[in-house]
Image (cartoon, rainbow, N blue to C red):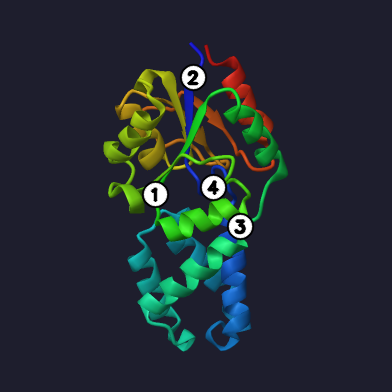
Amino acid sequence: MRPRAVFFDLDDTLIDRAGAFARYVEGLIERHPAAFPPLHRAEQLARIHAWDQRGAADRASFCLRVTAAFPALGFTPEALWEDMSSRLPRLVGPDEGVCEWMGSLTARQSVAVVSNGSGRVQRTKLAQARLTELLPDVFLSGEVGAAKPDPRLFQAALARVGRAPGEVLHVGDDPERDIAGAARLGLATCWVSHGREWPRELPPPTFTVERITTRVQDIAGVLARWT
């Protein structure tokens, strides 16, 4: 059976959140050069990216670590989060291939965004990526009140599309939150690996693609061959 509905995570699935984060950090250094001495800048950048964990790190803990490590920023953890959450979403750009493909996909079947994050941040990213009108069904943890892998977020989307879990494919980049969380409910899954190895302690996804942005043909192929 082909999927009757497809759910997509947002960050590093439909959009290049990693690229936006890198641009945010570069801008932070440009705005606060005294906090990042040039001699150690490469090491400092690597630490910040490691602490971020591709967006998976707890935001409060991440901001606390950064402000403690770089006091010359002059930010409290709360101020850093406000700066990041207001600036980073506007650094997301559209992927023309994703937009074109999504337009054809939504004409054939139900599609929804199922993502952790606040409405303010994630809806700004959708708008910057030119996906708002293409994807009106959006289920965000900050609005639903449950975060992946909590089944309630997936269940809210399932109720909206009116499909059983076995009729739905969920696509995302986080092994636990996206893939294991969806699989526990009986959804088929597609992991967006970004070149990473799958964690051996978790049951494998149904499908794997390396990325969607700039490589939309790979996920299109998954949907075309799923029977």
Residue 85: mark in rendering: none
Q: Nearer the viewer, mark 3 or mark 4?
A: 3
Above or below — where is 67 with respect to 219?
Answer: below
Q: In the rendered structure, which amino acid carries the disc numbered 1?
A: Asn
Q: Which residue is mark 2?
A: 3
Q: Measured along the vertical axis of the image, is residue 79 above or below residue 84?
A: below
Packing grade of label 4 (10 A; few <14, some 14-19, many >=20) is many
Sequence order check: which comes first, mark 2 or mark 1?
2
The residue at 53%/85% (across/down) is: 35
Of badges 4 and 2, the one in the foreground is 2
From the image, tell me which residue sits under label 3.
Answer: 92
Q: Earlier in the sequence, mark 1 or mark 3?
A: 3
Q: Earlier in the sequence, mark 1 or mark 4?
A: 4
Residue 163 spot, x, y in % from top left:
38, 22
Label 3 vs 4, first from the N-terminus: 4
Q: Nearer the viewer, mark 1 or mark 4?
A: 1
Q: State the separation of the CA atoms marked 4 and 2.
A: 22 Å
Tag 1 residue: 116
Q: Which residue sits at x=34%, y=30%? A: 159
Give SS at disc 3. Answer: loop
Would you say the residues marked 3 and 4 are in contact, meaning their CB atoms lie under 8 Å apart?
no
- Coordinates of residue 137 in the picture (x, y in percent): 46, 39
Residue 12 tag number:
4
Cα separation, mark 3 vs mark 4, equals 11 Å
